Amino acid sequence: MIEVNRKEIERYLGFKGVTEIDENIARTIDECIEEMNAQVNPKFTYKTFPIHWRFSFKLVPDEENGGSKKVKSTSCEFEGIQVESGNLLKNLEGCSEIVMLAVTLGNVPDMLVRKAEVRDMMKAYTFQAVGAAMAEAWCNEINDRIIKEAEERGLHARPRFSPGYGDFPLSVQKDFERILEMPKTIGVTLSDSLLMTPTKSITAVIGLSEIDTNCEKSGCEQCSMAGRCEYAR
């Protein structure tokens, strides 16, 4: 059974900041949690790779003093993936390894949503919200496992970072699918638009470092929509 954060479900339903929700809606949430938990088949896969860092210097115009100045440029690569995302580079600073992670709840959440859409749209919306929160909770469980395994090796995990966060492009989903063999290991495939099927699936990278930064395992502060998203924590 996956323990789901009810506040997350309420947030997905648009009840952020509401102290007490309608009794009927609360009952529907309970029913959807119970029904989904009874049927889901959660799966996961992850692999760890070394990070290869590259440091160089380039000359840029010095507008303040005239002339030019040297600026340090940093980039990294893992398992053939060149990291060009400034947000992810900042997240991985000081890391020597990286975990590529993929989790899914399977086809059940999508099936329950489709069935509910025929007779009860409110329940369909609730199944969507429960599925999203449950996928996040399942990802947290596997994230905790990765953190524990890292600690046993004297390493500390950074907040997980998913394709689509900040300037980390969705196109890297193709690398996840290939490297983690997602269709075979967890039954997740990509559409032409890089969306995952089943939909209640998550991919992410987690940097591992000898330096303990006391980071949360995930956080909306990593997203470029921080402070502007209605779903922000």
Image (cartoon, rainbow, N blue to C red):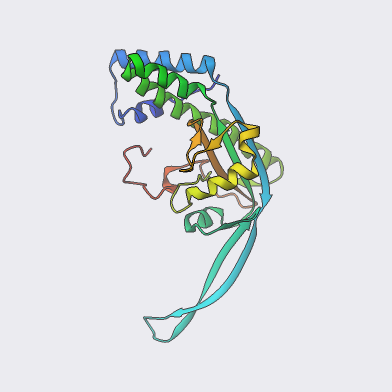
Name the quarter where the N terminus is drawn: top right
Which residue is found at the position 62% from the left and 66% from the top?
A: 54
- Residue 4 rendering spot, x and y as whole percentages: 47, 24
For the residue pair 176 and 37, the one nearer the viewer reads as 176
Q: Position of residue 128 (x, y in %)?
A: 40, 26
Q: Quadrant of residue 203?
A: top right
In the image, is residue 195 above or below residue 70?
above
Q: Residue furthest front?
A: 192
The answer to which of 20 and 123 lies nearer the viewer is 123
Quick check: 107 left or right of 148?
left
Q: Classify 122 as above or below 189.
A: above
As drawn, is 6 to the left or to the right of 88?
left
The residue at the point 63 percent across, 62 percent down is 53
Q: Which residue is at a point 37% across and 81% down the rendered structure image?
A: 63
Q: Which residue is depicted at the point 52% across and 24% down?
A: 107
Measured from the top left, where is residue 67 in percent x and y? 42, 86
Residue 155 appears in the figure: yes
